[in-house]
Amino acid sequence: MCGIVGYVGHRQAERVLVGGLRKLEYRGYDSAGLATISEGRVEVRRAVGKLDNLETLLDAEPLSGSVGMGHTRWATHGRPSERNAHPHRAGDVVVIHNGIIENYVQLREELAAAGCVLCSDTDTEVIGHLIEGGRKSGKSLADATRGAIARLRGSFAIVVISSGEPDRLIAAKNATPVVVGLGQGENLVASDIPALLDYTRDVLFLEDGEMAEVTADSVRLSTFDGRVVERAARRITWDPVTAQKGGYKHFLLKEIHEQPTAIIDTLRGRLDQDAASVTLGELEGLEKDIAALEHVTIVACGTAWHAALIGRYAIERLVRLPVDVDYGSEYRYRDPIIDSRTLMIVVSQSGETADTLAAVEAAHERGAKVLAVCNVLDSSIARKADYVLYTHAGPEISVASTKAFTTQLAAFYLLAVWMGRRRGALAAAEEARYVQALAELPLLVEGALKEEEAIARVARQLSGVSDVLYLGRGVNFPVALEGALKLKEISYIHAEGYPSGEMKHGPIALIDEQMPVVVIIPTDEVYEKTLSNLKEVESRGGRILSVTDDADAELARISEWVVPVPRTDSLLMPMILAVPLQLLAYYVAVERGSDVDQPRNLAKSVTVE
Ligand code: F6R
């Protein structure tokens, strides 16, 4: 993870770098740091915690100079502290890094034996010392960086500056993103496009195994083995939407409430209500291959993986193709059996998740085409995939995913209907029925939001518990997983999602009078079965919170709390049922006083494996 930014030009670097870091703080907020070159010296400022702390330090001790770098950290090696914050200095060399150096222990030992004094617990620091070693033997900064890189194993995006060559910075990339921004008399590098857009719209994306030597007037790309790379710049035509809280106390609450609009944006232009059909112009190229497909593999992480599980139901039911779903972090270490008859679908809000990105590469190596369901335009995954179905959810600032999840579901429903028709598995009348039902979803989600006050009251009663079990069946089992994940990550309460029918195979042992059980129980084909599972909870004294579209007398009797939601086709219900669970997690977290938008230990974009 971590965000990196570098600047060479005619402005005060400090301001440019802090502005860039603001846009990158979603990548980590354990510490932040800046280094600039001024009057032939490199000056470094670092502070633990969020960027605000660094800004306070810079107010007291500003940095001058027009060449510099900035870093916002998500700690991997070494706990969050000032000494582990980037930039790291080694002699006249200063380095920042995003990624993991896997052989750093061996390199540390080697450097220490050679007399280097290592001042941090990080894997990054070795990079600076290796470069410094090269500099001492007379190499240029670029060549010394090249030499150091040859010793590294792992993933890295690095930026290096040195007072010995004060007019430039070096950036290098292997498996984590670096984008170069081309300005007039100034150039920048960053982990992500929005950090550059105040200064330029012309960018170059570094590929793995490449580095950039950047001065105010020039950018030279080359491979790690020294071959010059020529690449045309790309123009970024979209504007980053600056998200404001808009009167809400937290971004999370705002994003929960934005869901009806976000879902409209996902559906916009893709539902033709007159023709009663789904149109996905961006997937035109895929159309001719659909008949030959034999298999679909969906890969994602976290909340996106929960959306993928629901996507599997939709594709199996409407397209009648076998689907398997895997975690990005697991998939990359299997020896998956896929080929050109498999469609891989990757799901990622950020488009930067390292494990999901690696799955794209694995699919391509085996000849499979990749379709990305993605929110962030021009992100690494969007650029690598063969087809992209953007969710258009708008910026999701809060670390916990909410509108990204429901819009991913909307994208899956669209895709399943579209593919189902093209494979002949879905009749026109069924397509028409789904088009109608999809068009109604935003209003139904709006309806689910109306229960907010009641949910806040329940949250007050639940905020003191230490464990919660979430149960769901069929297409709503992933909703249980998602509800539990939301609660865990923002309230720090232990929660587990289980298929209702699995409860008696183990978790039922946990149930007593202290144990709330949240059950997702719409009146679908498995309602009766889930109700039976709840009776098992009731007879063991568990406290039941039911989320349902229609509580019959028996469900009402055994539930301590009932949260009603609107009803639609059972396949589409997860989108509506997820909403009260998001609100519940939010209000429990608020009650417990946690940092709702930036929960401890997390980052919005997970760019390390
Ligand atoms: C949970 C959450 C994470 C992400 C996961 C994948 O609320 O946000 O679990 O869903 O890190 O991120 P993306 O979708 O960016 O690949």
Image (spheres, rainbow, N blue to C red):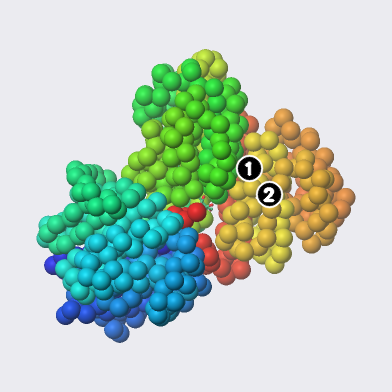
Mark 1 belongs to which amino acid? Pro
Using the image, determine if residue 169 lies above or below residue 364. Answer: below
In which quadrant of the rendered view does residue 265 lie? Answer: top left
x and y percent of residue 476 in the render? 65, 39
x and y percent of residue 237 in the render? 24, 44
Seen at 61% across and 53% down, the residue is 485
Question: Nearest the camera: 299 or 193?
Answer: 299
Label 2: which residue?
A: 497
Decide if ligand 1 comes within 8 Å of the CB at mark 1.
no
Q: Secondary structure at mark 1?
A: helix
Q: Marks 1 and 2: CB-CB under 8 Å?
A: yes
Q: Secondary structure at mark 2?
A: strand
Seen at 68% across and 60% down, the residue is 494
Residue extending furthest toward the bottom: 60
Question: Nearest the camera: 186 or 559?
Answer: 186
Give the CA distance from mark 1 to mark 2. 8 Å
In the rendered structure, the answer to whether residue 500 lies left or right of residue 92 reads right
In which quadrant of the rendered view does residue 528 lie? Answer: top right
In the rendered structure, the answer to whether residue 159 lies left or right of residue 402 reads left
Q: Residues within 10 Å of mark 1 (few under 14, many from 20)?
A: many
Mark 2 belongs to which amino acid? Gly
x and y percent of residue 330 in the render? 57, 45
As drawn, the label of residue 478 is 1
N-terminal label among 1 and 2: 1
Residue 411 seen by the camera: no
